[in-house]
Amino acid sequence: MPTEPQSPYLPFGENKHAAWFGKDIISVKQFNRADLEYIFGVAHEMRGMVERVGTFDLLKGKILANLFYEPSTRTSSSFTAAMERLGGSVIPINEVKYSSVTKGESLSDTVRTLECYADVIVLRHPETGSAAIAAKAARKPVINAGDGTGEHPTQALLDTFTIFEELGAGQVDGMTVTMLGDLKYGRTVHSLARLLSLFKVRLNYVSPDILKMPKEVMDEVGEKGIAQAEFSTLEKVLPETDVLYVTRVQKERFEDPADYEKVKSAYVIDPAIMQAAKQDMIVMHPLPRVTEISMDFDDDPRAAYFRQMEYGLYVRMALLAMVLGKA
Ligand code: ASP
Ligand code: CP
């Protein structure tokens, strides 16, 4: 338990009646504005604790199973760091080929196995809907760390926290957010568009014709009364943009490699292009990047993508504490 003074945000301590105790985190559709304020309040406190004491014992004795069927650097290592900074420990299964998945074990049986040893399961899987299947099989909380082209809810939470921290929580209503790149296969933008529809934002979608935002997502966002517009080039919308959210073309999702070749270099953000943007805006990217943001832009103060990764640690600490009944 931390010895720091209690925060107005964060009632540290066991609370099995807390709203999020034992819950799965599968989709951003689970969250409302009050939930975001709560999560970001806890994340803010987690940041303060990491800066003051580094590691503390809020989740001492708790174990996380980190089950990754797809590659990951940030999500996997930030969940590990989050658990360890909270005093817990991690079973890492990053290479399922060395697990009994190779012997044909189903996802449901795999999570039923891991919950015998762990208190919470973080799952990344190539199939849309896999996190919901795992959550149905498991009694312990399952956190979706990316299900195919479906959702990446913890990324959208950290993205929204980034916008709050960088541009001010009170500024989100009225903002223009421009999503650029692979909006068809990019699960992060599917989650982020849905989550931002809780606010009075304007959403611009800039993509090649074959990589447009799915109709299903646009319909859901439209039902919330959010203004959305589609473009094939950035020029027109860049000057009005408060958040430019750049994505990687998701090579691994293409059925025809020739299609990938056609669109892989559709957009490149560089200092020359960014001259047309405001000074008080930010450029975000879930990362990894390939060529869509030039490294020449990294030193620009508007380049928020490295800071964005750090915010992810605090949001994931908050989520683990919440589902384990400690926040
Ligand atoms: N890392 C993010 C994801 O897993 C974005 C990307 O891979 O391009 O969805
Ligand atoms: N942003 C993200 O999910 O990164 P990884 O694929 O490296 O986990």
Image (cartoon, rainbow, N blue to C red):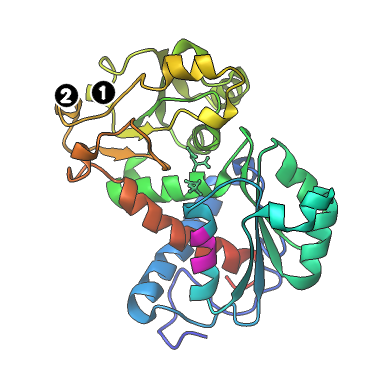
Looking at this view, is 100 or 83 the one in front?
100
Q: Quadrant of the C terminus?
A: bottom right
Tell me if residue 208 can be seen: yes
Name which residue lies at 47% across and 11% down. Answer: 209
Residue plotted at (29% across, 49% down): 166
Residue at far bottom of view: 3
Residue 273 lies left or right of residue 76; in this view the side is: left
Nearest the eye: 98 or 52: 98
Residue at disc 1, secondary structure:
helix
Q: Position of residue 240 (x, y in %)?
A: 25, 24
The residue at which mark 1 appears reads as: 238
Query: Which numbered tag is attached to residue 20?
Result: none
Q: Give the labeled residue for mark 2.
A: 276
Mark 2–mark 1 distance (CA, rounded to whole Å): 7 Å
Q: Are marks 2 and 1 in contact (CB under 8 Å)?
A: yes
> Mostly what secondary structure, the magenta segment?
helix
SS label for mark 2? helix
State how many labels appear: 2
Residue 174 visible in the snapshot: no
Q: What segment carries the magenta color?
A: 77-81
Question: Would you say residue 79 sits in the magenta stretch?
Answer: yes
Residue 164, image x and y in percent? 36, 49
Residue 9 image position (x, y, % from top left): 46, 68
- Category of crowding for the residue at label 2, using alpha-carbon neighbours closer than 10 angstroms: few (below 14), some (14–19), many (at least 20): some
Q: Nearer the viewer, residue 264 or 136?
A: 264
